[in-house]
Image (cartoon, helix red, strand yellow):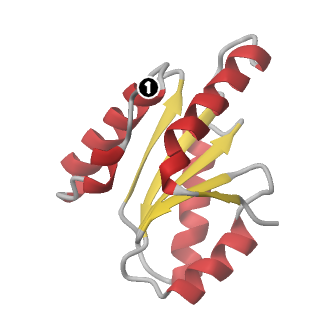
Amino acid sequence: MAGVHFGFDNFKQLLDLTIGLAQRLDENRAESFTLLYCDFSKVEQSVIDASLKEILRNSDAIVNDKADYFFVLPYTDKYGAQIVKKMFSEFFAQDLHSHMVSYPIDGESAETLVLELRDGVSAQHQNDLRCLDSFNPY
């Protein structure tokens, strides 16, 4: 198993696509997907690469800017995303700074989800995710 890695410059398009699929396929509009942020700044890249191959499903998407990793987890609620985060923490044998938002509960657009994620990370960890400054809302 392994997630599909997208370039950070395609993050907005990935979220728009995932939202579009959820709107078309998820009639009851439950938690269609969760966007999980993890700070991997204290982990070596080779260990990160190994963890991505072992932990993520083929349907999961990965976007990162340096050590800031964002995971789009389809048909996964916050409880399921918390399990993924725990698997990473166990793999790395350390606690990770993380935050998550779910569509549509926490927002119905890519911009809203990213703002909610950024606000949550900033409030919890004094990390303002400057990489999201380049998130283009069109």
Q: Which residue is at a point 67% across and 22% down the rendered structure image?
A: 20
**Residue 91 at what x, y percent from top left?**
59, 79
Side of 30 where 107 appears, left or right: left
Residue 114 placement: quadrant: top left
Any part of residue 128 in sight: yes
Residue bearing the label numbered 1: 106
Relative placement, left or right, of 121 versus 96 is left
**Image-quadrant location for residue 88:** bottom right
Which residue is depicted at the point 63% across and 35% down? 33
Amino acid type of the residue tagged 1 in the rendering: Asp
Q: Nearer the viewer, residue 63 or 106?
A: 63
Camera-side residue of 1 and 131 = 131
Q: In this view, does 54 lie above or below 18?
A: below
Q: Where is residue 7 in the image (x, y as percent from the top left)?
A: 56, 57
Where residue 23 sits in the image (x, y, percent)? 68, 16
For the question of whether residue 31 can be seen, the reply is no
- Quadrant occupied by the N terminus: bottom right
Residue occupying image coordinates x 66% and y 15%:
29
